[in-house]
Image (cartoon, grey):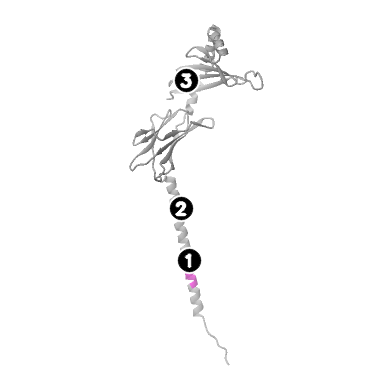
């Protein structure tokens, strides 16, 4: 697995004692794995009260820090307590090291993004063109998208969406490019993701997509076939009418009553 970093979050004590119908206390424990072999592990704990951060423990620093006066005083005493330090080491082993095999197994879920470019607005002389480059159904979340104009990076007129979660695992990502097209230039979208050994570059083609061309060809064939049927029916009707008139004229006799 070529993953350079991976984040595993384990939620702890989501249903801590409630002090009132509106108050709640929450503790969140996280294991962060860095490196291709998950050899660097950082264990963190974040406590909050009514969505306000109170205290944080970080195994890299090896201590607690407080975000309020009350929690600052508590962190001071907890950092001096040897029993608390041993408890954090045990938690890191149970939550991080003992689950390392399962985290590595999850790496098999990595999925390479599907990349597409399409035009949203075509230039009309008054407004610039607008393209969108989209990355679909990729995992893990980390991704980088770059616009290129004649193989040179473009930053002006570029906007990015948030990385959008889709379902329980995959993500989508979009970027827009607003530009004034010039003859003979090449616009492309370069995507970098952990599942790809090298960046993938997709070149924008302003001609009709193959699917649209197929629709047009099928429509023209249907139109031509309809005209052929219509003309054939018209010719057949004319010929039948001519034969009928000839028969009637050939058998026509005048009859006059005798005096």
First in sequence, mark 2 or 1: give its number.
2
**Residue 101: % across, % down:** 50, 20
- Judging by the rendered image, the residue that carries numbered circle 1 is 234
Disc 1 is placed on an element classified as: helix
Q: Count of labels shown?
A: 3
> Residue 192 is drawn in which quadrant?
top left
- Residue interval drawn in magenta: 232-241
Please tell me which residue lies in front, 153 or 217. Answer: 153
- What quarter of the picture does the C terminus occupy? bottom right
Q: Residue at x 45, y 52 (%)?
A: 218
Q: Is residue 239 magenta?
A: yes
Give the Cα separation between the discs numbered 3 and 1.
78 Å
Q: Residue furthest left?
A: 184
Secondary structure that dominates the magenta span = helix
Q: Residues within 10 Å of mark 1 (few under 14, many from 20)?
A: few
Give the Cα separation between the discs numbered 2 and 1.
23 Å
- Judging by the rendered image, the residue that carries numbered circle 2 is 219
Q: Residue at x 50, y 75 (%)?
A: 245
First in sequence, mark 3 or 1: give its number.
3
Disc 2 is placed on an element classified as: helix
- Judging by the rendered image, the residue that carries numbered circle 3 is 33
Q: Residues within 10 Å of mark 3 (few under 14, many from 20)?
A: many
First in sequence, mark 2 or 3: give its number.
3
Q: Is residue 7 magenta?
A: no
- Considering only vertical position in the picture, is 60 above or below 232? above
- Considering only vertical position in the picture, is 221 above or below 18? below
């Amino acid at each position: 697995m070529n993953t350079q970093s991976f984040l595993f979050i384990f939620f702890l004590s989501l249903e801590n004692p409630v002090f009132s119908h509106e108050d709640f206390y929450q503790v969140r424990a996280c294991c962060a794995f860095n490196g291709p072999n998950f050899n660097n592990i950082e264990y963190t704990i974040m406590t909050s009260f009514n969505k306000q951060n109170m205290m944080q423990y970080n195994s890299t620093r090896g201590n607690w820090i407080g975000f309020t006066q009350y929690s600052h005083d508590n962190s001071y005493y907890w950092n001096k307590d040897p029993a608390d330090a041993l408890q954090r080491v045990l938690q890191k082993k149970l939550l991080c090291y003992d689950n390392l095999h399962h985290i590595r197994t999850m790496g098999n879920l990595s999925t390479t993004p599907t990349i597409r470019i399409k035009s949203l607005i075509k230039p009309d002389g008054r407004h610039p063109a607008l393209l969108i480059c989209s990355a679909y159904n990729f995992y893990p979340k980390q991704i980088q998208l770059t616009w290129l104009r004649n193989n040179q990076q473009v930053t002006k007129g570029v906007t990015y969406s948030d990385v959008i979660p889709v379902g329980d695992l995959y993500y989508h990502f979009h970027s827009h490019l607003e530009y004034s097209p010039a003859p003979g230039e090449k616009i492309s979208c370069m995507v970098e993701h952990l599942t790809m050994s090298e960046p993938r570059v997709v070149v924008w083609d302003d001609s009709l997509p193959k699917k649209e061309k197929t629709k047009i060809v099928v429509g023209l064939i249907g139109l031509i076939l309809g005209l052929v049927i219509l003309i054939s029916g018209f010719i057949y009707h004319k010929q039948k009418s001519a034969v009928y008139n000839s028969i009637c004229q050939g058998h026509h006799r005048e009859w006059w009553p005798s005096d």
